[in-house]
Amino acid sequence: MNEFFQALDASDKVRQIGVLATDSAAGEEFAPHTHAQAQMILAIDGVMIVRTDDGSWVVPPGRAVWLPAGTRHGIEMAGDVRLRSLFVAHEVRPSLPRECRVIGVSGLLRELILATDGLPADYDLNHRTGRVLALMLDEIEIAPSLDLHVPMPRHPQLAALCAGLIREPSVPVTLASWAAAANMNARTLGRTFRRETGMTPGAWWRHTRLLLSLPRLAAGVSILALALEHGYDSPSAFAAMFRKVLGVPPSEYLPRK
């Protein structure tokens, strides 16, 4: 991957739009870094977690994360992942999103990305290769944003509590236990947490735990096991909350046989 980044700096044409195919093993991590270009990372297979200063994005198969130019980010592979990364200079399409987001990937966008394998680097935007890339950017502009973001508070004590839950999502937590750990009263903690994340602590716990279940589902952990870990009485109760938050059943993320 470092060789590709060097190529981006070395060639004016590649610097405009570049595509990189990468296979990464489970547990592999890319340390926090930035790019001069905006980047879209598509998970063809597998689940990755992309972390920025503002929070984390869980990117399941068939979805992509969009990162504006200059966004400091690290990537953790929650399973074996096949990636496609698209790098776009701002001047190519200034109307592309200015904030991080996970986007739905249409069938057309996915095929366009796959079609970039083997495309020449010295493309002309007015010829076929350039038109394929331009249509890809059109699809990114209209792609729906998905609610797969874990917002992180900036308050140091609250951020530490959130980081602890992300590390061990099955550990029971309560507003009282968090308030005691943060040396705050429960009302102040709730008010501060909502101001900094836009969510109540309870809603944040549910949302975060569901998102963190995606890598485990992709790894083949059963819905029953996850339901019990998350304190649900039955797999159907877990599935109902999963569908309510993410819009699809948990079976959508199970590995395909």
Image (tube, rainbow, N blue to C red):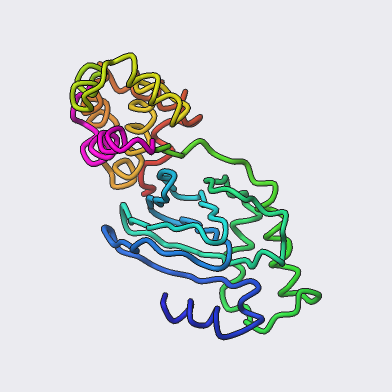
Asked if residue 70 lies left or right of residue 76, the reply is: right
Query: Residue at the location (25% across, 28% down)?
Result: 224
Q: Is residue 102 above or below residue 161?
A: below
Does the rendering let one see residue 47? no
Residue 160 among those drawn in magenta: yes
Residue 123 among those drawn in magenta: no
Nearer to us in this view, 14 or 117: 14
Asked if residue 55 lies left or right of residue 227, the reply is: right
Q: Residue 190 location, x and y as percent?
A: 36, 19
Query: Residue at the location (38% across, 53% down)?
Result: 46
Asked if residue 173 lies left or right of residue 2, the reply is: left
Q: Is residue 56 above or below residue 247?
A: below
Nearer to us in this view, 42 or 56: 56
Q: Residue 175 location, x and y as percent?
A: 26, 18
Q: Residue 58 location, x and y as percent?
A: 41, 45
Query: Residue at the location (57% across, 45% down)?
Result: 104
Query: Residue at the location (39% across, 48% down)?
Result: 256
Asked if residue 196 lies left or right of residue 125, the reply is: left
Q: Which residues are magenta?
A: 153-173
**Quadrant holding the N terminus:** bottom left
Quadrant in which residue 205 is drawn: top left
Nearer to us in this view, 194 or 239: 194
Q: Is residue 159 above or below residue 182?
A: below
Does the rendering let one see residue 135? yes
Q: Disc count in the image?
A: 0
Q: Residue furthest top?
A: 187
Q: Residue 119 location, x and y as percent?
A: 62, 78
